[in-house]
Image: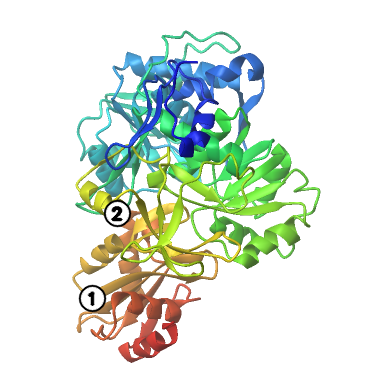
């Protein structure tokens, strides 16, 4: 092996990099350069070699993916079949003029075609982004305008909770306001009729040359710089301040593989129950398992269709050994059943890891004792889309092999705090999965937020260190929150509410939710001529959904007589969260005096 430069404190990353497939080996593991540094200098890389190609000889007939659709249809792709599908689609994209650095938008749900499209883009060096299927046409148009794709993938329709979302129709509407998209590739999923326009192509027509069991024609994978961007992630809904993060191929795969092998999974089938548009699902539900040569489960729909036992059925049917999901999903599973699943149903399940939001101890105990009867290990993971997904797990598989991010908890001046003290979590060591670059008018704000301390990455998360040394995460410092794994800007929701002509003031906040654990709620002050009734509440909440999508829609709304200036913003939000905890669909009616009283209760 050629001489290599490896800082001693980053030796764990060199061990991870040696588990990947390189077209040309790197010579320098990491160089400090700018905010994010430079990784794997001197190397050439294509992530599809590590995720697919190298497994063909030994694992060609092993299932790479088990897929199940919401209506109950099922498919399986071996590593050899995944390779053939990837190569065929990569060739079709090349035939449409897509090459290195071009952009492709994937308006797709959890389908095998989504994974094939991701890999095909990576194969030829194109940059992709996954657009959430629930986005309304206006929000979809904004994302497309920001990303500027040459090709858009979509579906005729998508199953969602027993109904069909008209994805192709929404995409067509969005494209009337966006230029530059040359082709729309459509996956035939539901069989609904769709309008057809110049440039539209059925996916099955593009890959009609596939020969089952035969070798697909290969034009060769692009040999790329290790930091060449493979995907873009829309950070949050910030109107006029759009932000997209670009992740590199080798850097993302290195962190995905490190976290999968040393943090998340034992041997066996792996299932990430989360939306494919979320980077965490792509990193840890697709790339991590594929790079490790494992078998991953993909489920298209919602876990209460056709019954609320669907999740446990999937675990039993595919022999899931490790389940990765959000605390919100686990709370739903707990609330849907009077009793835990029978032991035969979860006999294969050995590990459950939660991510994206804090998990309360009672939830972990339910998984450990009620579901697992002491057989299931339960862990909680923390990460950020800026960092490529999960960074740390409180009970990892192998602590010694998982790279150290150099965590510290500091005060506002950057001074490290004693154990037990609350402060901001920072990282003092480089992390390979960190975004490579930032696009959009809000890029400078992101840089200022995360790199304002020399030699450290500021997470903008509050935390404290427990006596035994593990970290307790206490929520976000900024106004961006995670809702079912999707980032939502509280400021953006507030702006939409303030745009309504009958709203004088508004505040948006997180609060306890009886079903989801945590959710978004809002409080508004109306103009004197407007009566605060149910119809007004529906209009306000529908306005948010139409502009920003369903995950941004507040699940509770309070009408307040006025907002005074006696309370700081954080204190006001805490008081509102206290008064709206447990509220349902009916709007609440609060007074400023009630908020002042509640603020006294919320003070530490």
Residue at left 54%, top 40%? 259
Q: Nearer the viewer, residue 129 or 113?
A: 129
Work out which quarter of the rendered image holds the C terminus and state it.
Answer: bottom left
Which element type, helix, strand or loop, lies under badge 1?
A: strand
- Relative to residue 249, is residue 454 drawn left or right? left
Pointer 2: what residue? 453
Residue 64, image x, y percentages: 60, 27
**Residue 183 seen in the figure:** yes
**Residue 207 seen in the figure:** no
Are dots 2 and 1 in contact, CB under 8 Å? no
Which element type, helix, strand or loop, lies under badge 2?
A: loop
Residue at left 61%, top 62%? 468
Q: Nearer the viewer, residue 161 or 485?
A: 485
Residue 74, image x, y percentages: 63, 33
Give the quadrant of residue 564.
Answer: bottom left
Residue 252, image x, y percentages: 43, 35
Closer to the eye: label 2 or 1? 2
Whether residue 10 is situated above or below residue 448 in the rendered picture: above
Pointer 1: what residue? 505
Whether residue 330 is situated above or below residue 62 in the rendered picture: below
Q: Nearer the viewer, residue 156 or 511?
A: 511
- Relative to residue 436, is residue 578 drawn left or right? right
């Amino acid at each position: 092996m050629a001489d290599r430069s490896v800082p001693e404190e980053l030796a764990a990353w060199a061990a991870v990099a040696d588990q990947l497939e390189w077209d040309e080996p790197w010579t320098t593991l990491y160089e400090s350069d700018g905010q994010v540094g430079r990784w794997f200098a001197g190397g050439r890389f294509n992530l599809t070699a590590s995720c697919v190609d190298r497994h063909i000889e030994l694992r060609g007939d092993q299932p790479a993916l088990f897929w199940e659709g919401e209506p109950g249809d099922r498919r399986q792709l071996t590593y050899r079949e995944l390779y053939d599908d990837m190569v065929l689609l990569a060739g079709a994209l090349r035939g449409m003029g897509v090459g290195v650095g071009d952009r492709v938008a994937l308006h797709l749900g959890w389908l095998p075609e989504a994974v094939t499209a991701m890999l095909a883009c990576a194969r030829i060096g194109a940059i992709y982004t996954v657009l959430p299927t629930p986005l309304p046409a206006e929000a979809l148009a904004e994302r497309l305008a920001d990303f500027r794709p040459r090709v858009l993938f979509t579906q005729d329709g998508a199953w969602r909770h027993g109904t069909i979302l008209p994805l192709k129709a929404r995409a067509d509407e969005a494209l009337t306001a966006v230029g530059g998209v040359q082709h729309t590739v459509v996956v035939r999923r539901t069989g609904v009729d769709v309008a057809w326009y110049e440039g539209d192509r059925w996916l099955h027509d593009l890959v009609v040359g596939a020969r089952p069991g035969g070798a697909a024609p290969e034009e060769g994978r692009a040999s790329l710089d290790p930091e060449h961007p493979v995907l873009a992630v829309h950070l949050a809904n910030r109107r006029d301040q759009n932000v997209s993060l670009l992740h590199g191929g080798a850097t993302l795969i290195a962190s995905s593989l490190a976290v999968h092998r040393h943090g998340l999974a034992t041997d066996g089938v792996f299932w990430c129950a989360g939306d494919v548009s979320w980077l965490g699902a792509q990193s840890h539900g697709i790339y991590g398992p594929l790079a490790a040569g494992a078998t991953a489960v993909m489920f298209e729909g919602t876990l209460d269709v056709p019954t609320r036992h669907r999740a446990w059925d999937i675990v039993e049917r595919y022999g899931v050994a490790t389940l990765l999901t959000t605390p919100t999903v686990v709370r739903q599973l707990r609330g849907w059943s009077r009793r835990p699943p029978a032991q035969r149903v979860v006999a294969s399940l050995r590990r459950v890891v939660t991510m994206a939001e804090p998990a309360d101890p009672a939830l972990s105990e339910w998984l450990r004792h009620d579901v697992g009867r002491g057989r299931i290990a339960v862990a909680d993971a923390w990460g950020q889309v800026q960092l490529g997904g999960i960074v740390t797990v409180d009970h990892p598989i192998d602590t010694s092999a998982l790279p150290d991010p150099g965590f510290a908890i500091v005060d506002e001046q950057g001074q490290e705090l004693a154990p037990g003290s609350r402060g901001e979590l920072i990282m003092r060591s480089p992390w390979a999965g960190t975004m490579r670059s930032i696009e959009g008018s809000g890029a400078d704000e992101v840089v200022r937020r995360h790199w304002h301390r020399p030699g450290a990455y500021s997470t903008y998360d509050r935390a404290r260190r427990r006596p035994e040394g593990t970290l307790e995460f206490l929520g976000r410092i900024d106004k961006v929150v995670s809702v079912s794994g999707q980032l939502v800007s509280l400021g953006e929701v507030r702006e939409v509410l303030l745009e309504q002509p009958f709203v004088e003031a508004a505040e948006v906040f997180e609060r306890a939710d009886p079903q989801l654990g945590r959710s978004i709620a809002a409080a508004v002050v109306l103009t004197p001529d407007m009566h605060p009734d149910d119809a007004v509440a529906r209009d306000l909440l529908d306005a948010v959904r139409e502009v920003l999508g369903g995950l941004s829609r507040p699940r509770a709304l309070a009408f307040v007589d006025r907002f005074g200036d006696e309370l700081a913003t954080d204190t006001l939000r805490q008081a509102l969260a206290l008064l709206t905890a447990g509220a349902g669909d009916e709007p609440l009616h609060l007074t400023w005096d009630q908020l002042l009283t509640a603020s006294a209760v919320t003070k530490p």
